[in-house]
Amino acid sequence: MKKHLELNNNDPGSKEVNETNELEEKGSKESGENRPDDSTKEKEEPAKQKDTETNELKEESSKESEDNNTVDSTKEKEESDKQKENGDKDSEEETVKNSDKSNVNQVITENWPSVPTSQENHTRVTFDEGSLDWEEMTTAISKGAGLSKSDMILWWVGGNGTNSVIATVTNKAQTDNYRVYVSWVDGAGYTPTKVEVLYENDKKQ
């Protein structure tokens, strides 16, 4: 019996079985040691994906903020341009009022621009036809009446102080009658200040 057991211990087949078992145990151990690495890798991948999504959300938020800033800037510019346009329009807008004065139908006031002057030492209105002062003054009168000088008849002009005049004019057809008020503005020139639309030419003889 004892001899039989010793033979079994020396049996080559038994040795091979033992070696196989040892290899299996070793492989199982190595597999067990590698599993934590796989688990870590699986954890790292969702974290990496989460970081990517966060970065994308930040980029989208930044882009939306830039777009909103651009829209606000454009809107402010449009409002500023609109206010400026309205301001310019108000400065040039004419006011027409009915009048209760005899022979005056309407009174027109407007921010007319001055007629550019070439005079350096203007002191008072002069009525010398053909002079520089006369030419600039009558140009301002025609501008106030809305007539070209070639289509205007100057029926009467008189002083209204040292630097202002009142003139009565019509068009060549004598269908439109105006009384025009003009004043000299230092550094600028003659400027229309008021126009009265007349029912009839009260200076016609």
Image (cartoon, grey):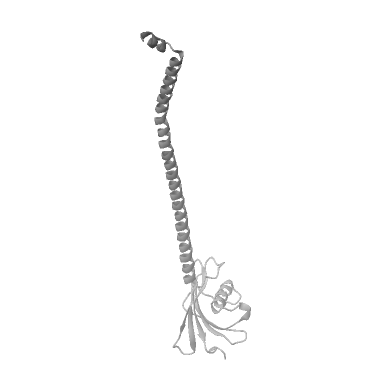
47 or 122: nearer the viewer: 47
Q: Is residue 119 above or below residue 52?
A: below
Which residue is located at x 40 percent, y 34 percent? 39
Q: Nearer the viewer, residue 141 or 9?
A: 9
Q: Residue at x 49, y 67 (%)?
A: 85
Of all residues shown, which one is farthest toward the bottom? 205
Q: Position of residue 127 (x, y in %)?
A: 55, 77
**Residue 66 vertical position relative to residue 24 in the rendered view, above or below:** below
- The part of the image, by quadrant, that contains residue 131 is bottom right
In this view, the residue farthest toward the right is 150
Residue 8 lies, with reference to residue 48, above or below; the image says above
Q: Residue at x 44, y 58 (%)?
A: 72
The location of residue 151, given as percent across then percent down, is 62, 81
Q: Nearer the viewer, residue 185 or 13?
A: 13
Q: Is residue 145 left or right of residue 99?
A: right
Q: Quadrant of the N terminus?
A: top left
